[in-house]
Amino acid sequence: MNDEHEERLSVKAIWPFALIIFLIIVMIVPIPYYIEGPGSTENLKEFVTVDNKKDSASGAFYLTTVGVRKATLGSALIANFSDFKEIISKKDLMGTSNSSEYARIQQYYMSSSKNAAIEQALKLADIPYEMTFKGVYVLAIEDNSSFKDKISVGDTVTGIDGNTFKSSEEFVNYVKEQKVGQEVTVSYLQDNEPKEATGKLIELPTDKKAGIGIGLTDHTEINSSVPVEIDAGDIGGPSAGLMFTLETYEQLTQKNIRKGYRIAGTGTINTDGVVGRIGGIDKKVATANENNIDIFFAPDDEITDEMKKAEPKIKTNYEEAKAAAEKLGTKMKIVPVKNVQEALDYLDKLKEKE
């Protein structure tokens, strides 16, 4: 009897510790998924500097982010019951990239977004500028490329066999004129450090011409008589393009286009000023609402037939933002914009905030 009694007491004594260990595992040990949720709302006065001066006018423009973190069993369970959190796989988040490559690609997209925003703002403010080609940015590397384990996603290719180029088109045309199997030496920058790698050109499946076997795009920098600096820190991705454009334009012109309002938004920007579709807009609306934003600009993008085939219930970013705002019961005004000029026209009609 004493042994049985002692055994029951032992089990009772162990049970709380076992429960604590179980809860620690559930809440701390990561699983191979990520959770996307509302991120941060960042004041762009802290990010953008024009002519070495800070923005001191009333109101503010804000970028909004989607928060991404590794999931645990506990956080995944909680996310399952949230309107503004989503469980996604690593493949859905990063594609075929590893964590390091994904981070570098996101930083490229941010850099490209800043350039496009500065270009648009300078155009709108009628200030001349010059775009400088820095090289070919590596977005992907084919598995059969002989440079696969030498050049990395995120590097900038600056030349081949001592030859430099003024655009990615010039670069591609030069390589296509070479022979498949020909050995070449590629010059490139990796984390701003100049390097060289030697390998053989492969046959590209698209046109049977010679190629290195990389996915590429132009890596450019913009310069003007009025210096513009945008420092987004560790934030990556292209979705702050619209808001960077508006903040830069305000500082260039000092027209007080905000009129005292707290204005957030999202959307890519291209060289024509078109505001492009982004992901996770519902989560961005949620973080903007948490931070007492007055107005939120949402891309009024066009849904193509191809997009509808892939996702029959697809909505525009504006429709998604409106639906999120209705769930939140927010007083924040959701404003659709197709291009940066529409955003400026809306701001022009605003009355000063009381």
Image (cartoon, rainbow, N blue to C red):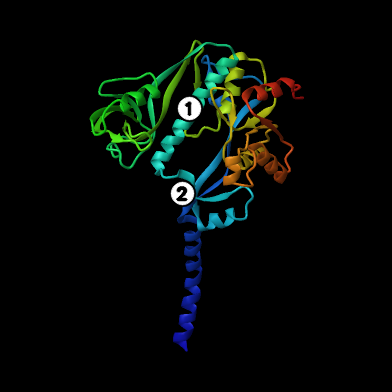
Please tell me whether residue 244 is drawn above or below residue 84 in the rendered image: above
- Say what amino acid the circle numbered 2 marks: Lys
What is the x, y in percent for residue 4? 47, 85
Against 51, residue 147 (above or below) is below
Callout 1 amino acid: Ser
Outermost front residue? 208
The residue that label 2 is drawn on is 90
Q: Can residue 350 be seen in this snapshot?
A: yes
The answer to whether residue 280 shows anywhere in this view is no
**Residue for point 47% across, 68% down:** 18
Q: Position of residue 140 (x, y in %)?
A: 39, 37
Q: Position of residue 17 (x, y in %)?
A: 48, 67
Element assignment for label 1 = helix
Residue at label 1? 112
Quick one: 17 or 237, which is closer to the camera? 237
- SS for callout 2: helix
Q: Is residue 33 left or right of residue 287?
A: left
